[in-house]
Amino acid sequence: MDKFSYFQSGIVDRSRKDVCCDTDVVEMVNTTTELESINLFVVRGDDPYLDDVLIGGDEEEEEPKSDDEWTDFYKDDYVESEDSDDDEGKVEFRVGQEFISQAKCREAIEKYSMKERVNIHFQRSERKKVAAECVVDGCSWRLYASINSRSPNMIVRSYKRTHSCYPTGTVTLYTAPKIAVDFLNECRTNPNLKADQIMQRLALKGLRVPKTKCQSARQMMLHIINDEYAEQFTRMYDYVEELRKINPGSTVILGTKERVFEKFYTCFESQKVGWKSACRRIIHLDGTFLKGRMKGQLLTAVGRDPNDQMFIIAWALVPVENKVYWEWAFFSDVTKSPAVENNISESYNAILKEDRRKPIIALLEDIRRHIMSSNNVKINEMNNAKGLITPKALAIIEKRKRSLKWCHPYPNGRGIYEVDHGRNKYVVRVRDCVSCTCRAYDVSGIPCCHIMSAMYAEFKETKLPETVVSDWYSIEKWKLCYRSLIFPVNGMELWDKHYDVVVMPPPDRIMPGRPKKNDRIRDPSEKDRCKASQIQNENLEPTEKIIVTCSKCRQTGHNKRKYKVASVSKPPNMPQGRPSKKPKTSMPSTEVGPTGETL
């Protein structure tokens, strides 16, 4: 690059000056400040495209006079944000514009209504004619299009583009099915998408949509997602073969009964190798209900890695959890884990809380991706760890060191100590085999505060407590646990198709228990409000006293429950039906004497 030059636009030859030193730069700045309007360019002296690119005409550009002209003058200086919904451009109509069909014409009008936030309705929508106008009274916007007799295309015959109203954001043509199409992909990833959230998202775009329409759109999306699960069952065999091909050695079992899905089991080869080689010999088993259309249970087997974190071993989908009996008859110290609860498995069920609503393949893929990403996080944490033992084991040792001030060891001279810990006493051995009568070290594999106090009294700082920690907490074991990896799986469109076998979805099951009522679930504040109104009504004096009549004695003041006198005969009931118009014939009266003879 030889030199730079600057010049006024259009008169290069007369005002071209070179910039060679700081003085030339100062002169260039002064030239810029002296002139009211000037365009300066800094270019290379050997630029071969100077005349074609930077030299303008001799005509000076006129200064804009009106506001509209200023807007057009600076329109290129404004850049729309990426979040704008006008990325596809505005919809414009003109007389003579053609559409290939009536549906395309309607679609363009609907799109225009959404872009401009104006409420438009179809005055006429026929196979050969379409007429649309603005809903606001007095607004002159109108469009009429019809099919030309010489071609099947629909042509705009008349168009009035001016709106005398202002955009309100209410768009009647933006119906619930269109909302469902726009939010369907988001609802697939987030089945708990609420109608209020949809309404708020549309409000940020300037669209005023009622909540009832958003609720209808949400129901449509849920129906579409639930119907998709039947299609996923037909690809179950393809999914099984894909898992076996991508992850060799994995155990994937698909159980069917008369070609109907019954159960599914998965255990990847990496999880097998990791648990057998480095995880402690303890497995947490638990099941959780599926909340989608397919009813059943998700069973999981969860282990513990050397860092005392969850290690997913296998999972299965079954119709029901039965014949499960838990027996806590024996607690072995081989596991080297103090856990006597099943919280780690419950924690994993909480992670899958939202995924249980998804179709079967989406559910299984979310489980696989979660395990794959979780293993990646643990591998990164493992690579950054330093020392001999895992971070959680080191944290437990640091926590137990805080109790050393309460421990007082008394040696016998042969590596056996009597450690006082408050009111308790424990016997600790630290030479040949490390042990403590509290048995915390035997169960967890991490030395207790009694052992650490005795070791410090015996070895001082030459032997640290980390050296007697069980091998299950070592960094080598931790790396060995995640040596094997789960490999990614291709999408459904890349799976090998098996047309010879078809899996049908299981029939819908009626779950036990009383079905939920369709009544609206009241908010707790509404219940308190109802109680307050009830108490207020009880304190008010009735305006008119209610008179109660007994159905047995026909007396007022009590009902039949409080009746204590013998009952009287009820009056005869009126005959049912319409009374007859014929006069009744009188029967001859007969009298009976005291002896029973007829008089």
Image (cartoon, helix red, strand yellow):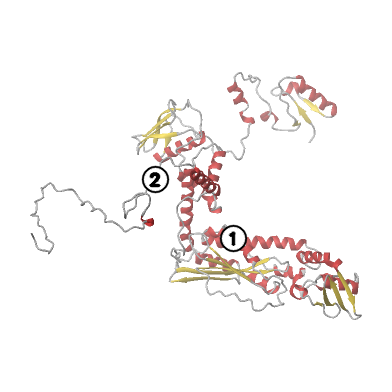
Q: Which mark is residue 546?
A: 2
The quadrant holding residue 446 is bottom right
Q: Which residue is mark 1?
A: 352
Where is residue 215 drawn, in percent x and y? 48, 46
Residue situated in front as seen by the camera: 225 or 404: 404
- What kind of residue is marked 2? Ile
Whether residue 494 appears in this view of the structure is no
The correct choice, above or below, for 70 with respect to 99 in the image is: above
* Sequence order check, earlier mark of 2 and 1: 1
Horizontally, residue 267 falls left or right of residue 460, namely left
Q: Is residue 285 above or below residue 53?
A: below
Name the residue rendered at 81%, 64% in the picture: 398
Secondary structure of residue under mark 2: loop
Residue 445 disc label: none
Left or right: residue 273 versus residue 33 is: left
Residue 151 percent across, percent down from the top left: 36, 37
**Label 1 is placed on what type of residue?**
Leu
Residue 122 placement, left or right of 284 = left
